[in-house]
Amino acid sequence: MPCPTCGATDARTQILPGYWRCDAVARAGELVGAAFASVPLPTSARCGTIYIQTRADDEAALCRCGDPAIGECTECTRAVCADHSALWQGWRVCDRDLANARMRSRATALAEERRRQEEKAAAEAERHRQRTELLELAAEDAVWILYARDEKRTEQEIRSAVHVLRRLNAADFTDTCLYLLPYAREVEKRGSALSRLSGWAFEGADYHGRSWFLTRKGEWHRSGAYGASASESRWKKIRFDDVEKRAVIDELAWQQTVDSGLI
């Protein structure tokens, strides 16, 4: 299609689908500007007219079905009527390209759904691995994982530490704590002035109404709930056996589970 202003066909640039800009150089008198004839114009200038035309010059503004076109497809730039086109995400698209766009959209949605399912399956597999596989830990490392709360623990770390410590007898558990605790926390002072205890407390906000205190001599004392009043928190020396040891380990593991946001 020739330029409607200067009639040139050999110099034009497509700036948008269906929109062309004439870049032909013509004499000023040939351009649509007669209204400004009184203004001195240069002898030649670029036309610059922007007009609508499909990509093929020999196409008439008719749809392939023969009906008058209402626009052109933004994908293939062919003239289309209302029956053979539709708006897709704000753009007019012919029925053929619309089908292809919907197929691509469906394929993208399916790929995204597969990706989410794969991520979900991988996460479930990782949770299963943490529930079934145990880490190889030394007894000191197991106590550190359950006692020191400097960072969050994984479910696998907590379960592995419990597994290791439950295999120790009460005396070995006490010796392990006495070896590690000076590196984990400072020595604490508990009790009244007459029965002052020096050692480390095994207590927490989520313990189930019990607290323990291990002195530097390796003696275990038990008291009431964490944060109880002075009259309710009197420490009583106990015989530390496997039952007490298991209770301490279970309370440590529960507190770490709460602190790490695993419940």
Image: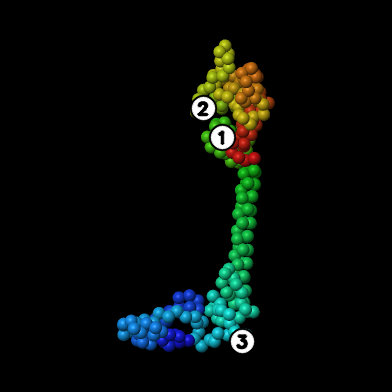
> Callout 2: helix, strand or loop?
loop
Q: Which residue is mark 3?
A: 66
Relative depth, front residue between 125 and 230 = 230
Rate crowding at label 1 as few (under 14), some (14 to 19) or many (20 or more) other CA atoms within 10 Å: many
- Which label sits on residue 172? none
Where 129 sits versus 64, above or below? Answer: above
Marks 3 and 1, how far apart at CA: 79 Å
Q: Which residue is mark 2?
A: 185
Q: Position of residue 263 (x, y in %)?
A: 64, 40
Relative depth, front residue between 150 and 1 = 1
Where 210 sits versus 31, above or below? Answer: above
Residue visible at 60% across and 72% down in the picture? 87
Q: Residue furthest right?
A: 243
Residue visible at 41% across and 84% down in the picture? 32
Q: Position of residue 206 (x, y in %)?
A: 63, 31
Quarter holding residue 104: bottom right
Instruction: Of the two numbered discs 3 and 1 on the same chain, state the one appearing first in sequence.
Output: 3
- Which label sits on residue 145? 1
Q: Position of residue 65 (x, y in %)?
A: 62, 85
User: Is residue 5 rendered to the left or right of residue 71?
Assistant: left
Residue 161 appears in the picture as rendered? no
Rate crowding at label 2 as few (under 14), some (14 to 19) or many (20 or more) other CA atoms within 10 Å: few
- State how the image is colored: rainbow
User: Is residue 60 rendered to the left or right of residue 34?
Assistant: right
Q: Residue furthest front?
A: 38
Instruction: Of the two numbered discs 1 and 2 on the same chain, state the one appearing first in sequence.
Output: 1
Residue visible at 61% across and 80% down in the picture? 81
Nearest-to-viewer mark from 3 and 1: 3
